[in-house]
Image (cartoon, helix red, strand yellow):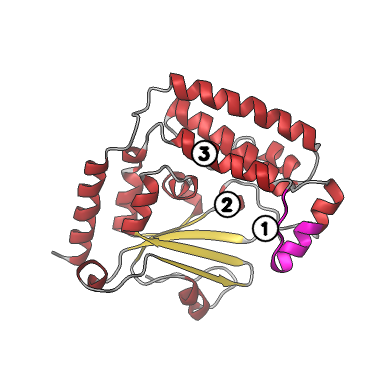
Amino acid sequence: MNITLPGLSLEQTRQLLPDGLILLVYRGSIAHDMYVPQSDPNSIDDKDIMGTFIGPEEFYLGFAHNEHKEAFIGEWDAVSYELRKLMSLLLKSNPNVLSMLWVDEKYVLFQDDFGEMLRQHRDIFTAKTVYQSFTGYAYSQLKRMTHFQFEGYMGEKRKKLVDHFGYDTKNAAHLVRLLRMGIEFLQEGVLHVTRPDAEELLDIKKGAWTLEQVKTEAQRLFKEAEKEFVKSKLPDVVDQKYVERFLVNMIKKYRGY
């Protein structure tokens, strides 16, 4: 792997990323076209990236146990999952890891043949379980919108925005986005990571909507999601046996077995 993230040295990049990396993408606000650069005094956005890696032989045949890596340097927030862990999350339709497979090509930072193979097989993780996953995450955003937790420098900036608007506008934007993405997936079997409604979501994020407007839209979307779940023609669940064979074959091929 030969990659250097913008503004970082090769050594700093290596500190953020794991060995055995097969795929690295932007996630969060950049991937959704909702990023507010830190040059903006009201910005509360990091540069979020997510990757997946195949572990060393000892991980699969010995005692090694390293399912994920998290690291922070400056505004870079990196998380990477070992492939087996990643697929266990994909089986549950986890919104964050699903986005890795559907993110626009321009937001792919690194991809080898195995990362490309994973993205080409994204449809095997398509199922109606997105309803429970996306609405579940949305409910958590709804709760956090008015039950505040602030940590670190960004937490202080976020607190100022909450004090100004009376609620967490970033959580509000996540809430609306998650519900809309879940509904679209149930309808189309496609995850629109780069948001066609980015401008409106940015308005919410910047406090242009009142708390009542956000709650009203969320209530409407929760109801719509339930209707689309009932109507959806997607498989009820992901075929776990098929995914298991795909996982084993990828690891064996990577390790040269």
**Residue 201, percent across and down?**
68, 40
Residue at left offset 74%, top offset 40%: 204
- Nearest to N terminus: mark 2 or mark 1: 2
Kind of residue sitting beneath label 2: Gly
Q: Which mark is residue 72?
A: none
Kind of residue sitting beneath label 1: Asp
**Residue 178, percent across and down?**
57, 39
Span shown in magenta: 147-159
On screen, residue 131 versus residue 213, left or right, reads: left
Residue 233 is one of the magenta-drawn residues: no
On screen, residue 200 versus residue 161, left or right, reads: left
Q: CA distance from mark 3 to mark 1?
A: 22 Å
Task: Assign the magenta stretch its main secondary structure.
Answer: helix
Residue marked by disc 1? 45
Residue marked by disc 3? 134
Element assignment for label 1: loop
Residue furthest toward the left?
257
Snapshot quadrant of residue 249: bottom left
Snapshot quadrant of residue 40: bottom right
- Nearest to N terminus: mark 3 or mark 1: 1
Quarter placement of the C terminus: bottom left
**Residue 49, percent across and down?**
52, 60
Q: Is residue 6 above or below residue 146?
A: below
Disc number lying in front (2 or 3)? 3
Observer-nearest residue: 60 or 40? 60
Crowding at dot 2, Cα within 10 Å, few <14 / some 14-19 / many 20+, comes out as many
The reply to whether callout 2 and callout 1 are in contact (CB within 8 Å) is yes
Residue marked by disc 2? 28
